Amino acid sequence: MCEMAVCKSSKKKQQSYISVPSQIISSISQSSLESLLVSPKKKLQSHPSKLRALLHSPRFLVFLIFLLGFLWMLRTYDFDPSIPFSRNPCAVSQEKGEILNWLSSSQLSMEGGTLEESGFWKQPDGMGYRPCLDFSERYRREGDIIVRDRAKYLMVVVSGGMNQQRNQIVDAVVIARILGAALVVPILQVNVIWGDESEFSDIFDLDHFKNVLANDVRIVSSLPSTHLMTRPVEEKSTPLHVSPEWIRSRYLRRLRRDGVLLLRGLDSRLSKDLPSDLQKLRCKVAFHALRFAPHIYEIGNKLTERMSSNGPYLALHLRMEKDVWVRTGCLPGLTPDYDDMINNERKVRPELLTSRSNMTHRDRKLAGLCPLNALEVARLLKALGAPKGMRIYWAGGIPLGGADALLPLVKEFPHFYSKEDLALPRELEPFSKKASLMAAIDHIVSEKSDVFMASHGGNMGHAIQGHRAYAGHKKTIIPNKRHMLSYFVDSSLPEAEFNEIILNLHQDSFGQPEIRTSKSGRDVTKYPIPECMCNNTNVA
């Protein structure tokens, strides 16, 4: 039985598709095709009797009728062999495949013209801001000395998911620069949740990382022989948001004495308010040095091309997994059984709750602290003018409740795809057992989308927001949850009035340029102005 969210009733008319891999088509040369379709003229002239006999043959007439019928079928169903199809829309392949149904390219192409004309795709005014990493003369002079140093080495162990590790690697490079030490390629701690044993070079382009930072920090693959027997000074309890001065006073003397310093748990340890040159270095690491490995970029770009082949698309990072509901202190609102499941899990493991344990679920929701569920995402997108026929790329894990949790969203926007839907058979096999690599693929397709939205912030949402700002302020919808959710629970509001209110609340939430220093504690890799981007008005 077909159990997918968007699968149609078996009573309705079924459609069949014939899939021909594009590799087979491209492997046939033009001359080979012509030789199959056009008989040599001389042979036709030399055997006229055979040709007449063939034309009058009943078998030939039956074959001709079959061929014409086959061609008519291809034209009727707008067959395109270059686009991959699921061999069976209800087949059980991967877990996301059980939820989503691959829709035909003919459905997409019919609406392509109206999609591009929708105002939903209009990009914000970037106000002329562009990347601008002009380091000071003092920074460059100090860099010449630092990269020649062979006495001090910093080792770091980074933890968490791929985007959390990415943030810690950025901070590790800056700390190495503050200490004037060489940085040993960061060690990625094995993720106990997903069992991912990926190393740095499995995810990121190591040679590119070294080359881009060659004038800022010396990156080495391992400790030199002179330091191999040195027992590193290990620091496990660095406070949150420390300054460069604190780092020097705490570590520099010991590092000079022992030669090697080992740091763990760098998440949010370094202050977000740093001197200008160090802020520029953070941008250089995040936006230039940390490039995904070539094999990840290749598959990410392929999936991006498939998503964009029929027009613009929205990338949607959904945070509806079980652990997200537990950690945020929120409820999924699917059924009382699911709410009880989350409440019981939270009681058994109260340490998982990340903030404000004294607030009720309703208070958290109205304060904008909860992820949006599928119904809320659908209503928000409709209010913002999203066309029903738009294509959505779904990034994120399997939601609690599976297909049922996504039904309200898929009903409103049926062209709903994940990387599993876009990939050819076995194309994702090299990545499927490693959550970090799969997250990297989602990152690429989301970053390159025409519009991006995250249902609940998080490390990936923040990282992509920063990348899209640095790339020219591509449209990024930032849900104004704190102000909009009270209208979501007001059932007396007519839909037209609701849509107008929600649209007005988001006029400044589409990824327009924002000055980082307008609010304290903002991360420059999320808000790169003014340290890392400039326009004609703020060029020195």
Image (spheres, rainbow, N blue to C red):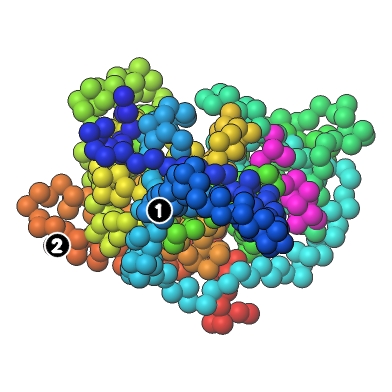
Judge whether 149 appears above or below 198 on screen. below
Cα separation between marks 2 and 1? 45 Å
Asked if labels 1 and 2 touch by Cβ distance under 8 angstroms, the answer is no
Judge whether 314 appears above or below 420 on screen. below
Q: Which residues are magenta?
A: 199-214
Which residue matches tag 1?
72
Q: What's the residue type where badge 1 is placed?
A: Trp
Quadrant housing the N terminus: top left
Q: Is residue 385 left or right of residue 469?
A: left
Q: What's the residue type where badge 2 is placed?
A: Ala
Q: Is residue 18 left or right of residue 3?
A: right
Q: Nearer the viewer, residue 395 or 264?
A: 395
* 204 in magenta: yes
Q: Residues within 10 Å of mark 2 (few under 14, many from 20)?
A: few
Which residue matches tag 2?
496
Q: Nearer the viewer, residue 265 or 489?
A: 489
Q: Where residue 331 sits: x, y (%)?
A: 27, 33
Q: Where residue 383 sits: x, y (%)?
A: 24, 59
Q: Is residue 213 left or right of residue 522?
A: right
Determine which quarter of the picture holds residue 345: top left
Q: Is residue 260 visible?
A: yes
In the image as oriented, which residue stretches furthest toward the top? 348
